[in-house]
Amino acid sequence: MTTKDQKELGNTLWRIADDLRGSMNADDFRDYMLSFLFLRYLSDNYETAAKKELGNDFPTTSATAASPLALWYSQNPQDTQEFEKQMRRKIHYVIKPDFLWTSISELARTQHGELLHRLEDGFRYIENESFESTFQGLFSEINLSSEKLGKTYTDRNTKLCTIITKIAEGIAQFSTSSDILGDAYEYLIGQFAAGSGKKAGEFYTPQQISTVLSHIVTLDSQDPSTGKKNYLAKVLDITSGSGSLLLNVRNQLGPHGIGKIYGQEMNITTYNLARMNMLLHGLKDSEFEIWHGDSLLNDWPLLREENPAKKISFDAIVSNPPFSLRWEPTDALAEDFRFKNYGLAPKSAADMAFLLHGFHFLGPEGTMAIILPHGVLFRGGAEEKIRRKLLEDGHIDTVIGLPANLFFSTGIPVCVLVLKKCKKFDDVLFVNAADHFEKGKRQNQLKPEHIQKIAATYQFRTEEDRYSRRVTMDEIRTNDFNLNITRYVSTAVDEEQIDLAQVHRDLATLEATIREATTKHNEFLKELGVPSLPT
């Protein structure tokens, strides 16, 4: 499928969503739309694999007109158990024929009164039985009994029939590969984020910013100029949102370049979006793990090990945490192994707490890239102490300033901090990309050339007037560990120096020239008998 076709699929789905949601809140309708797209992908992927597995035994037509696989199940009850065992081995999940998209969309097309019950049963089955891992609560945000769909069962059933039929018709002409539907899923998340304003910050990092971070963390940590790593065993996003940032890292290295993806997300709706997003992009359930919980409290058992010899570490860590979130630092947290060597971030802004949480789990050869508000670079108090220790210990590698108004959730400019446990260079690279963007109607955009410039500057540690500079630790100490980017790389153009003495001389010369020209002109006027000009 071409890029044009991919965009058209996204636009088609968005038009369907916009037309059908009626009075329903966009955030609510998002969950229905994305869940049905997810079911379509799982079903088509399963039926394609089933057809390959069964070969000539796969029915070419179906008596039910809904699913050829349903016909095979009815004709071969003695073989279904072994067939499903093979499917679990090959694609890691099973879907009963009644719950496949072809069956569901046929019920919708015929306005069947049992569609709603079939969906409820199907969602339950996928959550608890389809995969080796259980995905409990995967569809918990899809309230099929909601009065937003209709006041009565019949009304709700009719509304769902309309939605599913329109989706089925709209995407029938498009490919159902994970790349295509995955891109469509991401596109819809972005479109819904655009309409969600500040709430979008809870679940979506714009692709352009994700690409900047993923370029950085996939390069060799000690010497980025040597290029990308071939393999990352473990990648973590401590505030994973819908998972787009993790998937972008995976895209940089390809499907075999990462061992396993890990993410943590506190918002239940977003957590479910992330799990669907992983599966819809073709990841097996064994290739990712998303935890629903609070990173600041570190309630994920996987990350609770304090023994340095046993604790898990990651080759790359990325994060776009909520900016300047208020939190409740306690005495117990002051002794937490993540914070005790640095101190606690202030109650008014948890930015440094998120940073320290992720940094604790960074491996010795890993790279961490985190998006934060500029305040962490220069605010005093507790944040200054944390910043100072990170700098003195040689952990802050690069500071990148991005343009304002890139996010749906805020118009403020943000920065990217790049951290390493062990780094080769004893200076800090500052990149001021604040003026390098394309202005948009609602949000500004980083174009491919802007992203490439940032990535190349980081990779080769190049210096450029009014854009990037390597700053020694001595200079940073002189500035009391203030990392305000414009202190080191100003984009301002110096005003031209004016030599007042020369200006005075030029004026005197000009006046003399005028007097001489006037005298000569008056001589001509006198010969003509015309009154002279005043001198």
Image: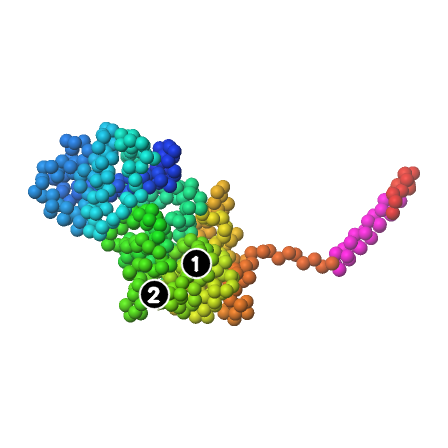
Numbered badge on residue 363: 2
Name the element at disc 2.
strand
Q: Is residue 115 left or right of residue 16?
A: left
Sort mark 2 into few (<14), some (14-19) or many (20+) by Cα contacts within 10 Å.
some
Q: Where in the figure is residue 395, as x and y percent of width and height?
A: 42, 67
Q: Position of residue 197 (x, y in %)?
A: 44, 44
Q: Which residue is mark 1?
A: 350
- Say which residue appears at 19% left-offset and 45% top-offset: 94
Specify whether 484 is left or right of 264: right
Q: Is residue 215 above or below residue 117?
A: below
The three-letter amino acid code for the residue at tag 1 is Ala
Q: Secondary structure at mark 1?
A: loop
> Which sits in the foreground, 471 or 332?
332
Foreground of the two, 292 or 237: 292
Main SS, magenta region, reads: helix
User: Magenta segment range?
Assistant: 501-523
Quadrant that contains the N terminus: top left
The location of residue 534, given as percent across then percent down, is 88, 45
